[in-house]
């Protein structure tokens, strides 16, 4: 698990368009694929990835799904379809289209009382 820039203990500022966060996620994927040492602990490289994102993270996850060959699928939890335009300064529909058109495996998870995601909203998309 990692936080996007400016969230939790991560440094920096949000990119506002989602593009900087997409760069961050691609970098995390590459990091996991080559392996590294963190705090003296060796992280062994992996061959395949499944991305999981929650809310804004699911938007970013879906948007890079086809950009990393080792990514085999994604799980989008509470994809905020109704407000992606605001979260990504009007890039949201293009991010959704990439996710929607990807041939990779996808799982969408949403709650019955989620204010920003619902089956009806995603069905319309």
Image (spheres, rainbow, N blue to C red):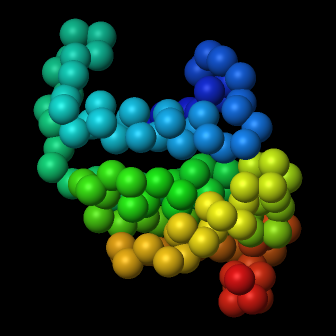
- Quarter location, residue 72: bottom left
Q: Which residue is pictured at 47% across the width and 40% down the height? A: 25
- The mark tally for this picture is 0
- Quarter location, residue 74: bottom left
For the residue pair 77 and 6, the one nearer the viewer reads as 6
For the residue pair 13 and 78, the one nearer the viewer reads as 13
Q: Does residue 93 show up?
A: yes
For the residue pair 23 and 75, the one nearer the viewer reads as 23
The answer to whether residue 79 is left or right of residue 25 is right
For the N terminus, the image quarter is top left
For the C terminus, the image quarter is bottom right
Position in image of residue 41 (x %, y %): 21, 17
Q: Which residue is pictured at 60% across the width and 34% down the height? A: 20
The answer to whether residue 74 is left or right of residue 94 is left
Position in image of residue 73 (x %, y %): 36, 66
Q: Is residue 73 above or below residue 14?
A: below
Q: Is residue 82 above or below residue 39?
A: below
The answer to whether residue 75 is left or right of residue 125 is left
Q: Which residue is pictured at 24% across the width and 54% down the height? A: 70
Position in image of residue 122 (x %, y %): 69, 82
Q: Does residue 108 show up?
A: no
Q: Which residue is pictured at 69% across the width and 73% down the height? A: 111
């Amino acid at each position: 698990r990692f936080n996007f820039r400016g969230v939790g203990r991560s440094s920096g500022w949000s990119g506002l368009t989602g593009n900087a966060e997409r760069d961050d996620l691609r970098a995390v994927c590459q990091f996991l694929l080559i392996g590294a040492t963190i705090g003296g602990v060796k992280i062994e490289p992996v061959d395949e990835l499944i991305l999981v994102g929650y809310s804004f993270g699911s938007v970013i996850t879906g948007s890079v799904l086809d950009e990393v060959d080792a990514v085999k699928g994604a799980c989008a939890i509470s994809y905020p379809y109704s407000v992606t335009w605001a979260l990504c300064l009007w890039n949201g529909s293009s991010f959704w289209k990439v996710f929607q058109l990807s041939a990779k495996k996808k799982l969408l998870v949403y709650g019955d009382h989620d204010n920003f995601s619902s089956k009806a909203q995603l069905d319309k998309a």
